[in-house]
Image: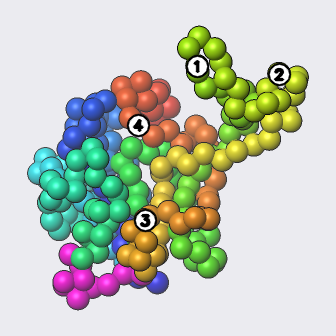
Amino acid sequence: MNILLIIPARCGSKGIVFKNIADLCGKSLIQYTIDVALKLKSNNLINNVIVSTDCEKIADISRKLGVNVPFIRPISISGDKAKSVNYILHALEYFKKLGINYDSVIILQPTSPLRTYDDVVKSIDIFLQNSNDSLISVYKEETVSDLIMYGKYREFAMPLNKNHNKGVRRQEHGSIYIRNGAIYIVKVDYIKRERKMISNTPLMYSMNKNSSINIDSLEDLEYARNLLCK
């Protein structure tokens, strides 16, 4: 299978200025993901890895770290409201014009620095061993349940589950799995056909909850520093 790995890294960020290249324990945030991606490439688990960015500064840093930045992403598909599928299709079309076609795409966001090489390898194994259009990474959440979830109407809590006050024990809530944004894998045929990167019933790879941090705020960045800067 011919696999393209894309690291998406926009300039803009509302929570942290130049978030994708913020300092994290003496390394830029994006380097944690680039290091994983390049190791996958050197071990022939993927065919190509690129950074897709609209930012010359991020492009320069990425190139110095050894990863290919074949183009600067158009502004029209780089704003806050731009869908992820657009930059994926843009990259696929770029390589198609060069006569290079891929079967599947892996997306590794720089905002998941605690995602490991082994996490991605195991995800690829799951994806290759099953007939499915996509895979997502998740973490297991034991406490979240609609039994303890409410909407709000004026000053009232509106229960999402009619049994919210029946004294159900926490152990009886059941577990759910939450998408953590660390790893996405999707077949090219599917993304071109449906213009989506997640199918209706994706495969899933479960990660440790502490490793599932998705950095979106200064608080998230500080939490990651507390875990990594030792």
Please give the name of the residue rendered at 36% of the width and 25% of the height, measured from the top-left corner. 218
Q: CA distance from mark 1 to mark 4?
A: 31 Å
Task: State the image quarter where residue 174 is shown.
Answer: top right
Instruction: Residue under label 1, please give it.
Output: 153
Q: Say which of marks 4 and 3 sits in front.
A: 3
Residue located at (61% from left, 58% from top): 205
Tag 3: amino acid:
Lys
Q: Residue at x 17, y 68 (%)?
A: 70
Pointer 4 or 3: first along the chain: 3
- Which comes sooner in the sequence, label 4 or label 2? 2
Does the rendering let one see residue 214? yes
Give how far apart the Cα atoms at labels 2 and 3 are: 39 Å
Mark closer to the observer (1, 4):
1
Q: Which residue is mark 3?
A: 196
Q: Can you tell which mark lies on residue 215?
A: 4
Q: Quadrant of residue 73?
A: bottom left
Mark 4–mark 3 distance (CA, rounded to whole Å): 23 Å
The mark closer to the camera, 2 or 1, is 1
Q: Which comes before the other along the chain, label 1 or label 4?
A: 1
Q: Earlier in the sequence, mark 2 or mark 1?
A: 1
| Residue that badge 2 annotates | 165
